Amino acid sequence: MATFQVDLRGMVDLLSRNLYSGPRVYVRELLQNTVDAIAARRQEEPDCPARVTITIEGSSLSCRDTGVGLTLQEASSLLSTIGASSKRDELGLSRGDYLGQFGIGMLSCFMVSGEILVRSRSARQAGAPTVEWRGRTDGTYEVRALEPHEPGNLDSPGTSVEIMGLPGEPWLQADTVRALVDEFGALLPIDVEVRSAGTSTRHAHQDAPWELTRREQHQWCAQHLGGEPFDIIPLEVPAAGLKGLAAVVTAAHPTATSHHTAYVKRMLVSRSAEGLAPEWAYFVRVVADSSHLRLTASREQLMDDDLRAETREAIGAAVRSWMERLARTAPGRFAEFVGAHAVGLRSVAVTDPDMLELVVRHAPVETTQGARTLAQLAAGGEKVRFTRTVDQYRALADVAGSQGIVLVNAGYAYEEEVISAFLARTDLLDPAADIALVDPGELLDAFSPCSPAEEAEAMDILMMASRAIDPEDCEVVMRRFEPATLPALYLPDPDLAGRVAARTSRKAATGVWSQVLGVTDPFAGSHVPRLVLNRTNPLVVRLVTARADDAVVTSTLRGLYIQCLLLGRQPLGPKERSWAAETLGSLLDSALPDSI
């Protein structure tokens, strides 16, 4: 018998602090070692049994497999193989071969145990003896070959790993072990039996989610992914030996990390795997198994290498194909999908050329002619203008329609950015398309001017308007436009908020800062908002033709101004709120008898 001393405690500390997420992974490592051992034996004996028996007695656990087993030489070199100089990972550990894998997996058991006993009999040597490896966290371990008459000899090839835990160790309790076996090994194609206190349960051999019927897949996703999926996309990537599904979820945010469920050779790797789907496909959750994707040192995440990148690209192509097919064959369902993910799809489209193309072709925007896609607007041969705010859209919609202009509401999140990105794509945009940001001045120019006689008649009213409403706040003009039921229209400047803030800063600044702000005013070339009085409206006609009292005219003009601001959901300052109160007071004064 050979006795050695190494820094086992240091190795365990390295594993627990830097490699594994927690003690629970010891069950997965035990199962993975058994799967690897059985696979190695089946290379030489294809019909060998594939069986794992886990027995729990008190505070100890044993795991017996029918795998390839270890020779005395292999058992003696377990720890030296872990630290081999070739094929090391980022922590200096070697999983480059079967022994390295087995050794690291075995050491994970020290996170729940102070002593590990390994007995193994090799299937590669006829009549091979049972070898025993016993290690402790005090740094000592022993390796020896058992004599035929000694207890503990194995009657057939394979390996038995026995864990001696501390009394009451929670990770060695029977219910916990069974739950972990089900979590990590439910899909394994081997027989797994767990025995404890006279109870025996069978595990593994479950159908994978992608092997279920369509209805069962939806039920599985609802149970495990937090909700009924909108749809399910089958996945197959031959280069990675990957089969699975992508569940399209109804609630997801593009900035949130997408967590996928990854299996490798039907062993669960992670339920929070990253990088399996492209970032733009934030609305899918991948559940898949791969036979070729490589794992990180902890075997808890997929390695970020060229194969994973190729797999991610293939999954992205499958998702894109699903969207194209849905838009073509089930436009109603696609509209429902876009409605659920409109903001997210547009946020991705701002930076992703392929998603931009899909959004342009299939995602509708609100217009004065109903819901239209940007592709339809570009190909329609019409003058198209978009607003930056919802309020501006509401204020200008009727007037734009009367002028034959299609107005687009780009006031929602990312819509203006998507339109700007679309206008920059010469490969998508029809050269004849006339799409631009709305210019209130352009609408004003499109209105019919008043006749010279009407202009002369309205001169007094317009002069009174310049006294009633500060020209710096709003310029009052008169035009003819439809609909005639609209007495006045407020045309806000697109940069109104910035212009007002800049003007306020200039008024508050003194000395050199006042000069700097005056010189660098970025809104110096912007237009003052306009209040356009409609000469075809009966109220405005009465206001112009009737020789009313100046106070009545002033109150009426301010009332129209306040009404337009409210309809356009523009902010009211202290002055405007005061005018609103005065207008109501004037109405009450004229309507109520003097005696009240």
Image (cartoon, rainbow, N blue to C red):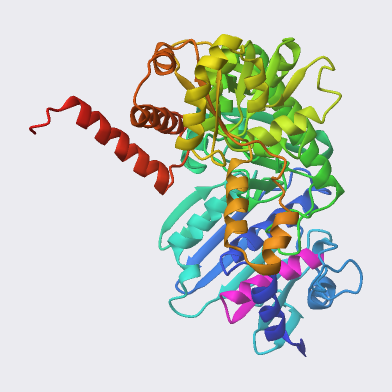
286 and 414: which is toward the camera: 414
Q: Quadrant of residue 231?
A: top right
Q: Position of residue 43 (x, y in %)?
A: 83, 48
Q: Residue at x 60, y 29 (%)?
A: 232
Quarter the C terminus occupies: top left
- Residue 547 figure quarter: top left
| Left or right of residue 589: residue 381 | right
Total numbered badges shown on the rendered structure: 0
Task: Report x, y in % for residue 75.
Answer: 78, 73
Residue 105 on the magenta span: yes
- The residue shown at (64%, 37%) is 414
* Residue nearer the viewer, 562 or 362: 562
Which residue corresponds to the image point at 26% horizontal and 32% vertical from the top-left?
A: 586
Chain part drawn in magenta: 99-117
Question: Image height check: is 426 above or below 111?
Answer: above
Relative placement, left or right, of 387 versus 121 is left
Q: 214 or 206, which is in the foreground?
A: 214
Quarter of the figure with residue 415: top right
Whether residue 365 is visible here, answered yes or no, is yes
Query: What's the magenta bit mostly, secondary-structure-wise?
Result: helix
x and y percent of residue 10 in the render?
Answer: 71, 84
Answer left or right for 442 relative to 576.
Answer: right
